[in-house]
Image (cartoon, rainbow, N blue to C red):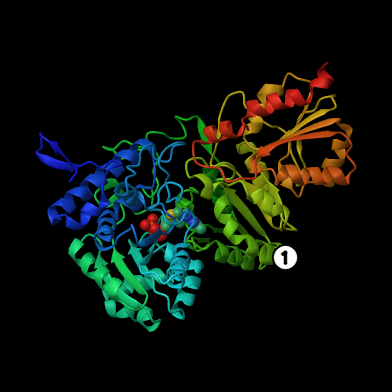
């Protein structure tokens, strides 16, 4: 067994390195299991305090994960974690001690097939695990093999429609899976919705589990997720059952780390690097010289809700990240956290929108993908009064491929009736928000989490009307540089002394035709979009230029149409050669002839 003796305290610790052999868990005594649990806890707190990460969810399921290794054999059995943000204990036990967690060349923050043969499925978005486990079970049955297929899902994740679709199919299918339902009564914030009420009932009175029994599942639980013996008995029963099993486990989010355990808001669900002793974040917007766009929009909506009773705010499950906790407390009747329910939220918003309410629908760009059909079929077709506040747009950094906010531009171009915009700073944000107040059709304002605040940033003093672009530098030259978003500041600094026209394309879709016609006077146009893939704004503008018969030259720098893996945003931009300085140099190259 792999131990380290800490002579001072005379405690044996486990070597939780790449050589840790999870097979040893099956033979460990209760004392050893507890020590293993405590070592995993300390490692997770250490790594999250250094690199940031999903702290609370992982702390709550350490014993549960160890118990899974005692009961199952992951050289054969398959486990699929929903979302994948609570795989830290599993990663540690399968030889991945979270080195450089979420960094460019470090351990991924989610489960990932390319990282380990023990990661059977990739995820990042919620509620895919049961469908995937049913698929794995089908493979097993068709190949006439024999192993367990487990979906591990939280009480937040299971309430999403996808899980209901999977369970609905499973009821009439003779394939067997085991659903481990990790019930900690929290999603990011406390779990909301009817299913959470049912689960609460079951926790108090297991007979209420009749809901699941009637549906032809074997219901086991509720089981204490801290108690190794209870879990062993429950897993053995689950393995023996002929039917699919819902194994309901109660756990405590943040267990074992005071601040996380006491957190009822959701601030320790995801943490930036922090001081272990005080629990306080080591980095904040002020010391990084940046401003939170999320806070800017939360404040704008707050002010508007105060005097306008027709304003509704909806935010499915990400209220903490969207800085909406206080706003939602202040206006409980007109704010809705609908849980992990992007599709429902879009239609709910639409119904309010067509009934003369002004709806602000807050969603991260990546999760908005879930509502694509509802945006076309409902919001856009009925042309309703919904403004999408699209947070975390552009490159997302350490969450990697599954969370990039770079595809919404492209999919909006295929949807009629929707206008899309992007501010470069708070002043742009206020302008766009003010325009949204008197615009009664679908409108998206997309923004990254933050922008850098520097003294020499470009500050606009111009008014704009809906659909207009801003000429930041209006030169006499026949060269135009078109961009938008926070990097406009960097480009402005780089080219302000050149004889070049710089345009802030505040509206990425739904801009006036006259803006395109005006471009006809330029010989060369450079389009720089570091916030969307190349099928987004740049392609859209090319099409528009083609329509007005533009016969000059166009060069584009946008994100490649690909899946972009983790790293800091700066590292990702460097890797992709899309930093402002890259665009600037590329632009100089493009206009060379004119300079000679
Ligand atoms: C489609 C989608 N919407 C939102 C999120 C953001 N998100 C990440 S974790 C999480 C909470 C999940 O709650 P639960 O399943 O109960 O797991 P817990 O973290 O509480 O253990 C949410 C909403 C997501 N990953 N996917």
Camera-nearest residue between 255 and 293: 255
**Which residue in the protein does label 1 denote?**
381
Residue at x 64%, y 51% (from the top left corner)? 408
Q: In this rendering, is residue 7 above or below 308?
A: above
| Front residue of 124 and 284 | 124
Measured from the top left, where is residue 31 in percent x and y? 13, 53
Q: Position of residue 383 (x, y in %)?
A: 72, 63
Q: Nearer the viewer, residue 467 or 117?
A: 117
Residue occupying the point 39% across, 74% down? 176
Ligand 1 is located in which of the four quadrants?
Answer: bottom left
Q: Are there few (<14), some (14-19), or many (20+) residues within 10 Å of tag 1?
A: some
Residue farthest to the top? Answer: 596
The quadrant of the image that shows the C terminus is top right
Q: Quadrant of residue 363?
A: bottom right
The reply, left or right, for residue 244 in relation to residue 42 is: right
Residue placed at 40% from the left, 58% from the top?
Answer: 81
Check disc 1 and report its element: helix, strand or loop.
loop
Is 90 placed above or below 357 here? Answer: above
- Using the image as rendered, state which of residue 270 and residue 292 is in the foreground: 270
| Number of numbered callouts drawn | 1
């Amino acid at each position: 067994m792999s131990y380290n003796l800490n002579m001072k305290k005379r405690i044996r610790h486990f070597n939780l390195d790449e050589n840790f052999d999870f097979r040893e868990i099956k033979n460990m005594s209760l004392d050893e299991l507890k020590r293993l649990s405590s070592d995993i806890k300390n490692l997770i707190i250490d790594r999250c305090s250094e690199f940031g990460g999903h702290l609370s969810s992982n702390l709550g399921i350490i014993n549960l994960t160890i118990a899974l290794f005692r009961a199952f054999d992951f050289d054969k059995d398959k486990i699929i974690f929903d979302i994948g943000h609570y795989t830290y204990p599993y990663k540690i036990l399968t030889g991945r001690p979270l080195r450089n967690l979420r960094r460019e060349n470090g351990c991924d923050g989610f489960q990932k097939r390319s990282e380990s043969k023990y990661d059977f499925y990739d995820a990042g978005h919620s509620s895919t695990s049961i469908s995937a486990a049913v698929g794995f079970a089908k493979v097993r049955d068709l190949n006439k093999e024999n192993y367990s297929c487990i979906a591990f899902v939280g009480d937040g994740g299971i309430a999403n429609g996808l899980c209901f679709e999977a369970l609905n199919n499973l009821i009439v299918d003779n394939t067997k899976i085991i659903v481990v339902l990790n019930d900690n009564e929290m999603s990011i914030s406390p779990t909301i919705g009817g299913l959470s009420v049912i689960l609460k009932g079951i926790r108090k009175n297991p007979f209420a589990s009749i809901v699941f029994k009637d549906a032809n599942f074997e219901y086991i639980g509720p089981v204490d997720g801290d108690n190794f013996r209870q879990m062993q008995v429950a897993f053995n029963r689950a393995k023996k059952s002929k039917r699919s099993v819902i194994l309901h486990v109660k756990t405590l989010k943040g267990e074992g780390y005071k601040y996380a355990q006491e957190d009822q808001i959701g601030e320790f669900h995801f943490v930036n690097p922090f001081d272990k002793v005080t629990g306080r974040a080591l980095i904040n917007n002020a010391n990084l010289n940046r401003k939170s766009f999320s806070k800017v929009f939360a404040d704008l909506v707050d002010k508007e809700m105060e005097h306008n009773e027709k304003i509704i705010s909806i935010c499915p499950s990400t209220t903490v990240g969207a800085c909406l906790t206080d706003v939602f407390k202040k206006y409980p009747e007109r704010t809705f956290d609908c849980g992990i329910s992007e599709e429902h939220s879009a239609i709910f918003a639409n119904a309010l929108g067509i009934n003369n309410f002004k709806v602000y629908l807050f969603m991260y760009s990546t999760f908005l993908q879930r509502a694509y059909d509802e945006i076309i079929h409902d919001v856009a077709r009925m042309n309703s009064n919904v403004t999408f506040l699209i947070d975390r747009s552009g490159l997302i950094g350490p969450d990697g491929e599954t969370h990039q906010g770079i595809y919404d531009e492209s999919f909006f171009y295929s949807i009629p009736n929707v206008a899309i915009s992007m501010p470069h700073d708070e002043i742009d944000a206020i302008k766009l928000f003010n325009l949204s107040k008197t615009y009664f059709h679908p409108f998206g304002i997309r923004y990254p989490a933050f922008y850098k605040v520097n003294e020499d940033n470009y500050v606009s003093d111009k008014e704009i009307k809906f659909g207009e672009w801003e000429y930041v530098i209006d030169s006499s030259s026949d060269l135009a540089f078109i961009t938008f978003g926070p990097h406009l500041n960097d480009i402005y600094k780089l080219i302000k002394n050149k004889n070049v026209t710089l345009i802030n394309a505040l509206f990425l879709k739904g801009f006036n035709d006259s803006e395109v016609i005006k471009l006809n006077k330029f010989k060369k146009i450079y389009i720089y979009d570091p916030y969307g893939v190349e099928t987004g704004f740049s392609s859209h503008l090319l099409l528009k230029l083609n329509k007005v018969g533009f016969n000059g030259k166009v060069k584009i720098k946008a994100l490649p149409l690909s899946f972009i893996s983790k790293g800091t945003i700066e590292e990702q931009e460097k890797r992709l050669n899309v930093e402002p300085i890259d665009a600037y140099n590329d632009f100089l190259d493009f206009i060379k002839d004119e300079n000679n």
